[in-house]
Image (cartoon, rainbow, N blue to C red):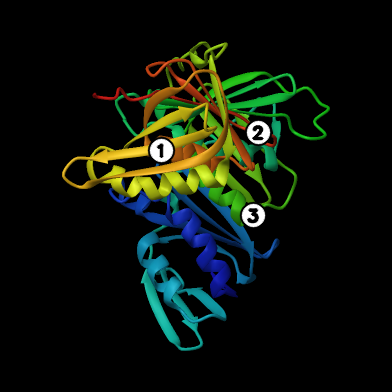
Amino acid sequence: MKLTCTQSELNTHLSLVSRVVPSRPSHPVLANVLLKAKSDTQQVSLTGFDLSLGVQTSFNAQVQEEGTLTLPAKLLSDIVSRLPEGEITLEEAEGESVVTLTCASGHYQVRGMSAEEFPELPSIEDTEVIHLPLDALSEGLRGSLFATSSDETKQVLTGVHLTSEAESLEFAATDGHRLAVVQTIPEGATQERQAFHVTVPAKALRELERMMQLNSTGDAIAVRFDQGQLICEWANQRLTSRLLEGQYPNYRQLVPRQFSRQMTADRRLFTSALERIAVLADQKNSIVKLSLDSVKQELVLSVEAQDVGSGREAVPAQISGEDLDIAFNVKYLLEGLKAFNTGEVQMQFNTATSPSILTPLGGLKMTYLVMPVQIRS
């Protein structure tokens, strides 16, 4: 094998696939990335795989001699990321599984392993291909991924539930304390897509998000899935992931139908005030109290951190309904507000112990439900 490519191109694609390489692999070859150089297409493909999540990405290079080899992911990444910008030549010694990297300042040798032991990425045959627009996917992931659970004992909640019905696409994520639901209706979507309900691990979707940011060429991602596997492909990129098993909660019934109180405020003002007051909230228990003042038409944010101090800020707001004192985990409020992309935000309440809803006004069609925290008098 012999090829020449730029340091930046190799480094970018290597950092993408290295992220899915396991730190404690079940088999030594899984600590490596699979490198394939093809002379007919003048392309190099890199693959990382941990047996449940796989990432494959390709880029253009000058391939003088084609070949296939696996190389240690961490070592290769560490070397390439530190090399000076410019062209790099990778050359494999015949019959030796050793690659020499040559750059302007010197050369390095890295010992690899035969590609024969590297497992193939899963493939799915005879299933319908669904084309999901990049912008709709990106919008849905931004508004839902942050609300997934990190508790592995509730495995189905560690993923995002995707539902496609007719022409709309819905993303839902909950960790038991909050729920984020995003509905996107892709522009120009005239074809009726196959209806489906799948739960995809958040880790896989975070990698998909990174890959989309790196390569957003093309209008849509081709998605295939069966009962246990999901495959996404676009513009020389491929991601495969196992799906999460189990019944996803019926989240739609958690959202209250009507509310007795409503507050509308400037999203940036609200977020900035929360960020400042969170400095004190973090000292003790991350709880912030919101007080609706319908006479002054303002939202008062306050924190009482025992033995540390207290904080109070007022934000102008349009308030309807009776006054209310209600408390929340400040992190949950901030994460929701930062996922919104609009100037104004609306918050709806019933009582101090029932769920509240945050929604962006205009733009993204998103519902964010947050459970309040009981205030100790």
Q: Amino acid at mark 3?
A: Asn
Classify residue 175 as left or right of residue 224. left
Gap between marks 2 and 1, in whole Å?
21 Å
Q: Earlier in the sequence, mark 2 or mark 1?
A: 1
Res 137 label: none
> Label 2 neighbourhood size at 10 Å, few (<14), some (14-19), many (20+)?
some
Local secondary structure at mark 3: loop
Q: Amino acid at mark 2?
A: Leu
Q: Earlier in the sequence, mark 1 or mark 3?
A: 3
Considering the image in quadrants, where does the N terminus appear?
bottom right
Q: Which residue is mark 3?
A: 215
Q: Name which residue lies at 56% across and 35% down.
A: 317
- Residue 256 place in picture, x, y as percent: 52, 13
> Label 3 neighbourhood size at 10 Å, few (<14), some (14-19), many (20+)?
some
Q: Name which residue lies at 40% across and 69% down.
A: 96
Gap between marks 2 and 3, in whole Å?
30 Å
Q: Which residue is mark 2?
A: 361
Classify residue 278 as left or right of residue 171. left
Q: Nearer the viewer, residue 221 or 331?
A: 331
Q: Which residue is mark 1?
A: 301
Local secondary structure at mark 1: strand
Q: Amino acid at mark 1?
A: Leu
